[in-house]
Structure formats: C-alpha cells, structure tokens
Image (cartoon, rainbow, N blue to C red):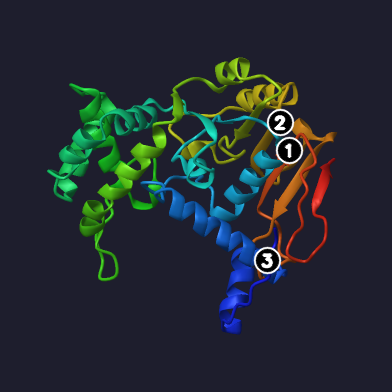
Amino acid sequence: MLSKISIREDDEVLEKLKEIYETDNLSHAIRLAIGEALVRDNNEKIKTLFPYIGKKPLRIGREVVEAFRQSECDVFVDVFCGSLAMICYLPYDTKVVVNDIDGNLTNLYEVINTKPDEFVKELLKIPYSEVLFEKFRDDIRNNTFETKLQRAVEYYFLRFCTYRGSNDFTTFKNSTTSDNYAMRFQKDMKMVLALSKRLQTVEILNRDFRRVLEQFNKPNIFIYADCPYLGTEKYYKNIFSDEDHRDLSKMLKAHKGKFALSSKAKGELRKLYRSNRHYMLEFEATAKMPDKRRREQLIFNFKMIHKNKFGEDDIKTYR
C-alpha cells in the first residue's frame, strides 16, 4: 500500500538531493535516499579499504546495480573486482562472485574473510612508517613471505599508504594538516571487520578472465566487466593487451546471460562492441555541464530502462 508523506526541508538540501541522485524528480530522489538508508540500517555499511586505480564511483555503481536488477539474473560476477567497489553497492542478499588476476588482492580478501581478527591484530601493531612502507614494498616485489597472513598485512599497508592508489608503490602518503593518515589507518580497522562479514557470502577467485567467463556462461548470470580501459593498461600491475580486449569482447558477445562493460568512449572499443543488440549509457563530465565531452560509458547486451536527470531516454544503440 502506498502512503503520502510530507517533508519539510530547505530548498538547498532538496536541490542537493536531486544532484546526488542525478534526477530532476524530487520524489524519485527521496525514494532512492530512503532505500539506501534502509539498506544501511539493515546491514553494516561497508566501503572500499584503500584508493585504487579504476575504482567506480557511486553514480556508476548505482547504474550497474540497477542493470543487474532489471536483468532478472540470479548471480553477479565481477570479473575484474579490483578494490571490491561493486559489493559495496550490491544488496547483501545478492549471490556474488569476485575475481581478479592480481594474487595479492585476492589473497588479501581471502585473509580478511577467513582470519579477520588475526589480520586486524597484526595491523594494529604496525606504526604508520615510511621505513616499513619501503620494506614491505621490497617484500611484495620479491615475494618474500612466510605466510598468507603476512602477505595480506604488508600488501594492505602498502595499498593504504600509497599516494593516489598507485600500483608501483613509489610514493608514501604523508599526513598533512587536514589529513592524519596515521589516525585514519587505526580507525579503518572497523571497516575491515565489516568487509569480512560481507565476504562470508562471496566467492573469491584468482583467475584469468577467460576461465571465469567460460565457467560462468549461463542465462541466469550477470557479468560485470571493468577491465583496464584502452590506453590506461600501463597503470595496472598485470598488462591487459589488445588481444585481451579482443578476447573479452568475443566472450561477452557470446555470453548466454546479461553483461555490463565499463569503458571510455573510444573508437577502437566501438569496433569491438558495435551492434544493434548492444546499448550504451554515457556519463557526463560533471552533473552540471551536460554539454561537455562525455568521459565514461556502460555497454549492455540488453536495453536497460533508464531516465536521465533531464527526463529523456538516454540509453542508445551502440553503433
């Protein structure tokens, strides 16, 4: 049963709400805000644990989750999971499989999943130190570990302390007058425990994407592919080649279920995915500059129902 409610709030707050949810429909924005609040109340809020190149912001994550809902698939497979941003946006009851070719990442998530208390206990012993940062960087580069726990602790420390989420771990992130990273490092332990709870129902894989797509090729499976963007591959530890992009496009086009691919708007990518059966949702440079060149896009193999904040249908055939 639907009920009407009255809300008294400053116009500035209401306008901000519409901006956050990218809609001119205030009622729709309020419904989304209430829905997210209910999810936060029913489940411990989780977030990504460190900066990571390619991490998806809320506005894109929300669209992927909505596409998954409309797909009516039962399983969400994140083929290039990176910092686990997507499980922060998905409902707790979603059956999720995450995969990444980086064994340091997947080992970290497995340890957080299975040994959260030991992991946090070891981290709390570590001072926020540039000397340790350099030592741990050498350990990671040379694979000198005695246990999976040690590997996870040192890798997490590097990830947290690295400036702007760089994968080469060259620059230590010093505290400033506005940001006390040493204090934040200690406080974020509660987020580790919240993520551990979420990972209890998540399957973690460390495979080449081809093996994942071969195994999870069924009508009830939704694939989310956030591979390194064309032209940005050098920023990742594991190089994603032109051949990898071609293989990924072939396997996604042959996928029996539904998929969403994150990408930049590039001509080379259009050659790989252009089809009357594929659809595209573009994201503007900023919410306030609709005429600026679009920076990111999602490509789907089904037509998602979507209304942008100007009230026009902006899902286009990918031709």
Quadrant of res 153: top left
The residue that label 1 is drawn on is 300
240 relative to 296, above or below: above
Q: What residue is disc 2 on?
A: 258
Q: Is residue 58 left or right of residue 114?
A: right
Residue 234 appears in view: yes
The picture places residue 128, in percent across and down from the top left corner, at 18, 51
Horizontally, residue 122 falls left or right of residue 223, namely: left
Q: Residue at the bottom extreme?
A: 10
What distance separates the C-alpha of mark 3 from that of mark 1? 35 Å
- Between the C-alphas of marks 2 and 1, the distance is 7 Å
Disc 2 vs disc 1: which is toward the camera?
2
First of labels 3, 1 by sequence position:
3
- Tell me whether circle 3 and circle 1 mark residues in contact (CB < 8 Å): no
Q: In this view, does 211 lie above or below 46?
A: above
The quadrant in which the N terminus is found is bottom right
**What residue is pinned by disc 3?**
3
Callout 2 amino acid: Lys
Badge 2 local density, few (<14 within 10 Å), some, or many (20+)?
A: many
The residues bearing labels 3 and 2 have C-alpha atoms spaced at a distance of 35 Å
- Which residue does the image show at 64% across and 61% down from the upper left? 285
Foreground tag (3 vs 1): 3
Specify which label sits upstream in the sequence, 3 or 2.
Answer: 3
Q: Position of residue 78 (x, y in %)?
A: 55, 32
Q: What element carries label 3?
A: loop
Q: Can residue 170 be seen in this view?
A: no
Q: What's the amino acid at mark 1?
A: Phe
Q: Count up the numbered dots.
A: 3
